[in-house]
């Protein structure tokens, strides 16, 4: 009845595969102290390479862009106990359902990058709203006509889809720092956030209709994929700004194309864009290069956020190897858990 | 003893010259209702053109980039009663000392653009700190190595030179929105701001030494020109960011060049850059294109700020023409004033 070692027992050694750039090796030392061998790979991995590299590994700190598919996990099942994902949006990178079935724990690092993501998102909101990027490097002063003048942030209404930790922190900065009017939509209403921050709840379509700037901040799940579709974008006021610093797939690329074409969306911010398999992504880049503000999934990449994420992931690996479970597990492994 | 009309008397008519783009004509209607003829010129003017255009004008709303030199004002003195400057940094555009001597009132629009300037400045602080602009358009995800990872804003110390309305609003957004540690230097200490915002005063050189991000927010005067010189920049910690959204000339271009060259300054933000007469400006652009975040003096260019500035300038024109003075006069015309 106890498939994990007794509480407090040290892990028995083995290999930890660590992927991804930007990880401070010093933060991995606790693993070495536990008798684990850390193998780090900073380059990107194919599925076959990943299968090979995971051979014999007991833990896998996923900080790269590779995909731990069902096949990869199946091949690793004999030794692998835990996949510690660096970040929260693991859905595209780890087949958590397969891991569940195989009894492999998958953990994430909620909250570790909240400040980083929210700060980045607010900066991109201002950048899109004022059109700062297209003015960078200008030699001649100012705007050339009144029709180009942007509205002040404080005169805009911002709608946030999703009121988790990140959505809440974005709302907080916008309210307390800039005095912006903020509404939100969320599956679950958040009376505490409404009261503390002075924000109001709206159904999704009403939020879209009432927001000059619509911010997407939900995790990617089967339920949220393409959640921002043509019915949502079609309700946005003309010339609105769409900010998606969550996962690209939450916004339907076809609906976005139409929204940009019809002028509902004047500018779209993405941190991470649709993959090369997405036909619309190419058309979006081709037809609206000036109206897409795209960065390569960098919002959470700060020294401090990485530090917190790695520490949390290392702790999760230790917990799963030592106690058999961790509080930051995602999925629903059917195991008894002690608290 | 009373060189101006009795209080309440309407101006007797005449022409108002209005320069600059982005001015909503509807906001000038109060002038027309006073019997004044509005002549608007949106293109840039040479000194000779300006002399011609001002012939017969009683008022001059300066919203362009032309220079109202001593000669221009002297030629206009017979009719010109007031130059209403759109904004606060009039020093490079209106010879206020000459106007003083000629008895021509010069007004500015303090406070009207505070929110716009502060919001723009904070966005550029985040842009410079995270290096967002160089990641725009990226197709590959993330940073490629840990040495490139930026620090979170909340982990940086920000120093603000100048604690007027704009400096204070920048401090407020950074403190209340982002929870950043803020210090300041100002000719006059501001105990109210220290108390209300939780910021601390430091002498200029100490501020420079203790700030990861140094923000310049003082008006340009004889006293502040080149205030940020090699002694200030030489004290900045290695890799610091210099943000000058006030007037370019407050930072010595030669000192900035050395600071960038030696690595004290990793990135410099300017809103408005040194003019073509400045030899160092060309060298700065040539040698550090990636480390200058330059926009063309656009911080105050929002619909709402322009609206407030134009309304204030129109009111100042009415006041000077009707009552002989206005509360927003700059300089020190030697006239009795009633309050």
Image: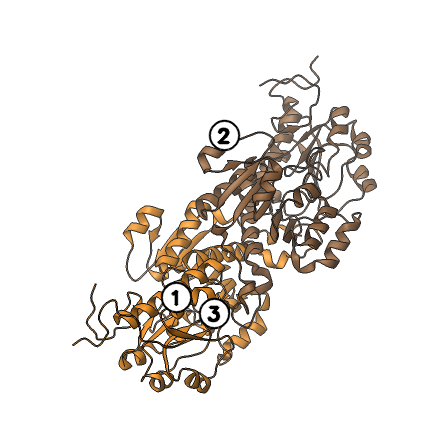
Chain colours: A orange, B brown
Q: Between marks 3 and 1, how big is the CA–CA gap?
A: 45 Å
Q: Between marks 2 and 1, how big is the CA–CA gap?
A: 47 Å
Residue tagged 3: A256
Specify whether disc 3 shares its chain with disc 2: no
Callout 2: few (<14), some (14-19), or many (20+) C-alpha neighbours within 10 Å? few
Residue tagged 1: A30
Q: Residue at x 75, y 42 (%)?
A: B66
Residue A155 rendering spot, x and y as whole percentages? 48, 47
Residue B186 rendering spot, x and y as whole percentages? 59, 34
Tell whether B291 sits left or right of B277.
left
Image mark 3: chain: A
Tell me the element at label 2. Answer: helix
Tell me the element at label 3. Answer: helix
Callout 3: few (<14), some (14-19), or many (20+) C-alpha neighbours within 10 Å? many
Residue B127 rendering spot, x and y as whole percentages? 56, 55
Looking at this view, name the residue that lies furthest to the top.
B1
Q: Between B205 and A39, which is closer to the camera in this rendering?
A: A39
Above/below status of A63 relative to A101: above
Residue tagged 2: B191
Tell whether B94 sits left or right of B266.
right
Q: Between B273 and B239, which is closer to the camera in this rendering?
A: B239
Callout 1: few (<14), some (14-19), or many (20+) C-alpha neighbours within 10 Å? some
Can residue B10 be seen? Answer: no
Q: Are marks 2 and 1 in contact (CB under 8 Å)?
A: no
Above/below status of B305 relative to A248: above
**Quadrant in the picture for residue B267:** bottom right
Above/below status of B335 relative to A190: above
Can residue A72 be seen? Answer: yes
């Amino acid at each position: 009845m106890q498939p994990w070692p007794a509480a407090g027992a040290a892990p028995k050694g083995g290999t930890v595969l660590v992927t991804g750039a930007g990880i401070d090796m010093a933060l991995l030392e606790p693993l070495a102290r536990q008798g684990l061998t850390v193998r780090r790979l900073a380059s990107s991995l194919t599925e076959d390479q990943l299968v090979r590299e995971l051979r014999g590994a007991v833990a896998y700190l996923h900080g790269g862009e590779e995909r731990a598919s069902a096949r990869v996990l199946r091949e690793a099942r004999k030794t692998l106990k835990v996949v510690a994902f660096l970040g929260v949006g693991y859905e595209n990178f780890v087949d958590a359902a397969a891991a569940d079935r195989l009894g492999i724990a998958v953990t994430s690092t909620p909250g570790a990058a909240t400040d980083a993501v929210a700060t980045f998102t607010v900066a991109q909101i201002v950048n899109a709203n004022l059109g700062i990027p297209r003015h960078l490097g200008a030699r001649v002063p100012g705007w050339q006509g009144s029709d180009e003048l942007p509205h002040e942030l404080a005169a805009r209404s911002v709608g946030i889809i999703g009121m988790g930790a990140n959505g809440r922190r974005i709302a907080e900065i916008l309210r307390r720092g800039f005095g912006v009017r903020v509404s939100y939509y969320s599956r679950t209403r958040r009376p505490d956030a409404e009261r503390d921050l002075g924000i109001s709840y709206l159904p999704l379509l009403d939020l879209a209709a009432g927001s000059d700037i619509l911010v997407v901040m939900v995790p990617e799940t089967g339920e949220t994929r393409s959640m921002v579709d043509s019915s949502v974008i079609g309700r946005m006021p003309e010339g609105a700004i769409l900010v998606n610093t969550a996962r690209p797939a939450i916004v339907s690329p076809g609906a976005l194309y139409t929204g940009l074409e019809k002028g509902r969306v004047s500018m779209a911010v993405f941190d991470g864009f649709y993959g090369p398999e997405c036909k619309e992504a190419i058309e979006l880049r081709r037809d609206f290069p000036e109206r897409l503000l795209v960065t390569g999934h960098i919002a959470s990449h700060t020294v401090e956020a990485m530090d917190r994420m790695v520490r949390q992931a290392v702790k999760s690996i230790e917990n799963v190897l030592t106690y058999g479970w961790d509080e930051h597990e995602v999925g629903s492994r059917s195991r008894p858990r002690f608290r």
